[in-house]
Image: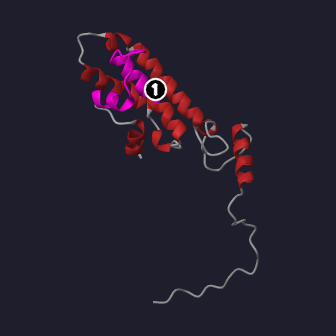
């Protein structure tokens, strides 16, 4: 069975098939941020406000760190409790704090800066749970081993 023989159109259609330039992308992002771009995709402008001109989402990561910080502070009585084991506190940290922190992490640009910010927050929480204060410090690897946790980089990679 042969495909049908269809003649090409005799007129040029006004369709630009070239990929957009970086400047066109930047201009479009600026228009979206200012609420001036009309798009047929029905994506609300608010959903795109956290994207910078390089396609990143650093403001989203900052917001993501702020929300679980509030949760962590609200659970202060649990972290200070002598009746709960470190294992139980770690599970509470994972379910109530880290899930909020890593929500949407599969869409983040995983730059070293982003991962470092997330890791610093998680390590800070773990040290507070273990009651490790300066100058009594431990390095990150023993901290992760003591709390049976993976580095943030691996956790984000697992979510992809």
Q: Position of residue 97 (x, y in %)?
A: 40, 25
Q: Does the magenta-highlighted stretch encompass residue 74?
A: no
Q: Judge left or right: residue 104 versus residue 42.
A: left
Snapshot quadrant of residue 80: top left
Q: Does the magenta-highlighted stretch encompass residue 142?
A: yes
Farthest front residue? 135
Is 88 rendered above or below residue 158? above
Q: Which residues are magenta?
A: 120-147
Q: Main secondary structure of the magenta part?
A: helix
Snapshot quadrant of residue 36: top right
Q: Residue at x 41, y 45 (%)?
A: 157
Residue that carries the numbered disc 1 in the rendered image = 121
Q: Judge left or right: residue 155 versus residue 46.
A: left
Q: Position of residue 47 (x, y in %)?
A: 59, 38
Is 67 rendered above or below residue 80? below
Is 51 rendered above or below residue 65? below
Quarter of the rendering occupied by the N terminus:
bottom left
């Amino acid at each position: 069975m042969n495909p049908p023989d269809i003649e090409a159109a005799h007129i040029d259609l006004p369709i630009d098939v070239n990929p957009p330039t970086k400047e066109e992308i930047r201009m479009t992002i600026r228009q979206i941020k200012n609420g001036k771009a009309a798009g047929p995709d029905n994506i609300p402008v608010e959903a795109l406000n956290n994207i910078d001109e390089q396609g990143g989402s650093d403001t989203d990561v900052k917001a993501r760190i702020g929300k679980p910080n509030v949760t962590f502070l609200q659970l202060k009585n649990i972290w200070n409790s002598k009746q709960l084991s470190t294992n139980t506190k770690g599970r509470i940290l994972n379910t109530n704090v880290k899930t909020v922190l890593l929500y949407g992490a599969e869409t983040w640009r995983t730059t070293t800066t982003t991962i470092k910010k997330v890791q610093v927050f998680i390590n800070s929480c773990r040290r507070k749970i273990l009651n490790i204060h300066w100058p009594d410090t431990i390095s990150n690897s023993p901290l992760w081993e003591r709390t049976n946790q993976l580095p943030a980089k691996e956790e984000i990679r697992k979510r992809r």
